[in-house]
Image (cartoon, rainbow, N blue to C red):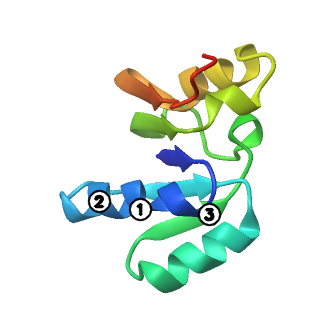
Amino acid sequence: MCCENRCLSLVFSKRLRDKGYNVVGIDIAPRCIDLARKKYPGVRFEAGDIENLAYPDETFAAITLFGVLHHFPDLRGVLKSCRRLLKKGGGLFSFDPNRNN
């Protein structure tokens, strides 16, 4: 699962898909998802809130968060959701280019 912030960074989902990974790109903004689907056909994109995704427990081998965490005043909900969604031994990678973090 690749959670990204806003339209510009949904390119990471495509790049991971191009490397052969089975990717679900998620963004909270439906408009960004619509744009990504048009720009990157063949990549699965869904609108969703990382704290409330309806996937079963242990669905993903890896979760990447690009420019996401600084939007949450309390990270516990996000991290709890990631832990629930990750398979045992799975990995979480976060990149948040915010100089105040």
> Looking at the image, is 27 positioned above or below residue 50?
below
Q: Position of residue 32 (x, y in %)?
A: 65, 68
* Left or right of 22 on screen, residue 94: right
> Looking at the image, is 11 positioned above or below residue 83?
below
Q: Which residue is mark 2?
A: 15
* Left or right of 32 on screen, residue 77: right
Which comes before the other along the chain, label 3 or label 1?
A: 1
Q: Position of residue 36 (x, y in %)?
A: 53, 73
Q: Residue at x 56, y 38 (%)?
A: 67
Q: Do the numbered discs 1 and 2 sit on residues whose CB atoms are within 8 Å?
A: yes
Alpha-carbon span between mark 2 and mark 3: 17 Å
* Left or right of 1 on screen, residue 7: right
Amino acid type, label 2: Arg
Q: Quadrant of residue 93?
A: top left
Q: Residue at x 58, y 54 (%)?
A: 26
Which class describes the residues within 10 Å of circle 1: few (<14), some (14-19), or many (20+)? some
Q: Which residue is mark 1?
A: 11
Alpha-carbon span between mark 3 and mark 1: 14 Å
Q: Which residue is mark 3?
A: 46
Q: Nearer the viewer, residue 73 or 63?
A: 73
| Secondary element at image label 2 | helix
Q: Position of residue 65 (x, y in %)?
A: 51, 36
Which comes before the other along the chain, label 2 or label 3?
A: 2
Q: Do the numbered discs 2 and 3 sit on residues whose CB atoms are within 8 Å?
A: no
Question: Closer to the camera: disc 3 or disc 1?
Answer: 1
Amino acid type, label 1: Val
> Which of the labelled discs sits on residue 69, or is there none?
none
Question: Closer to the camera: disc 2 or disc 3?
Answer: 2
| Secondary element at image label 3 | strand
Q: Residue at x 22, y 64 (%)?
A: 18
Which class describes the residues within 10 Å of circle 3: few (<14), some (14-19), or many (20+)? some
Amino acid type, label 3: Glu
